[in-house]
Amino acid sequence: MKYGVADTTFSRVDMGAIAIKVIKREDPDAEIIRYTVPGIKDLPVAARRLIDSGCDGVITLGWVGKTMLDKYSYLAASIGLIIVQVLTSKHVIDVTVHEDEADDEEKLKEIAIDRASKHARNLVLLVKEGKNALTPYAGKGLRQGYKDAGSID
Ligand SMILES: Cc1nc2c(=O)[nH]c(=O)nc-2n(C[C@H](O)[C@H](O)[C@H](O)CO)c1C
């Protein structure tokens, strides 16, 4: 399968490299194309171009600053990524770290690594095995970036 990895220079952690490592581990035959853009608002076109070049699915790795302008930028980018998914009928997994999720840099790095890794695995499962690949985990309260919340029985 062919995977697209789109990331940004705005990000403070190299989540693209982390995603590539996980995709290679989960699918040793994977073909991976990386596309790095300046910021989150540039991700929708990067994702679209990756799909147009034959990718079966894409993971985008964005970083959102602390200001309201950053948050509005993320909303715009997120809507753009959803439009790409609907128009192409391919998954674009939108991995985003929000700078105000944690105060200290080590914690932010930990969140970024965990979120990018878990969603890279999700992408491989969806692309390789399709719509029921994640069904065994439905309702389990899985979290990316944090420990799982767990299911309510
Ligand atoms: C305000 C702003 N905030 C962010 C952000 O939080 N994260 C990010 O990755 N990029 C941001 N950008 C840059 C835009 O996404 C984009 O790169 C530029 O507008 C150039 O198209 C902007 C302009």
Image (cartoon, grey):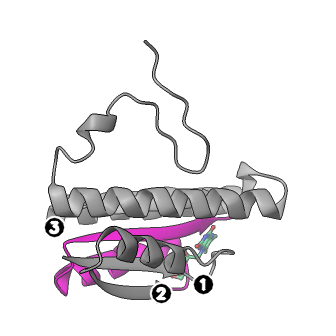
* Quadrant in the picture for the C terminus: top left
What residue do we see at 59% from left, 51% from top? 145
Q: Amino acid at mark 3?
A: Thr
Q: Secondary structure at mark 1?
A: loop
- Residue 94, position as x, y percentages in the image: 42, 60
Whether residue 76 can be seen here: no
What residue is disc 3 on?
Answer: 88
Residue 152 against residue 17 in the figure, above or below? above
- Within 8 Å of ligand 1, the CB of disc 1? no
Q: Secondary structure at mark 2?
A: strand
| Magenta-highlighted residues | 37-66
What residue is disc 1 on?
Answer: 9
Cα–Cα span, label 1 and label 3: 26 Å
- Looking at the image, which is closer to me, 23 or 44? 23
- Looking at the image, which is closer to me, 42 or 104? 104
Q: Say if mark 2 contacts mark 1, CB within 8 Å.
A: yes
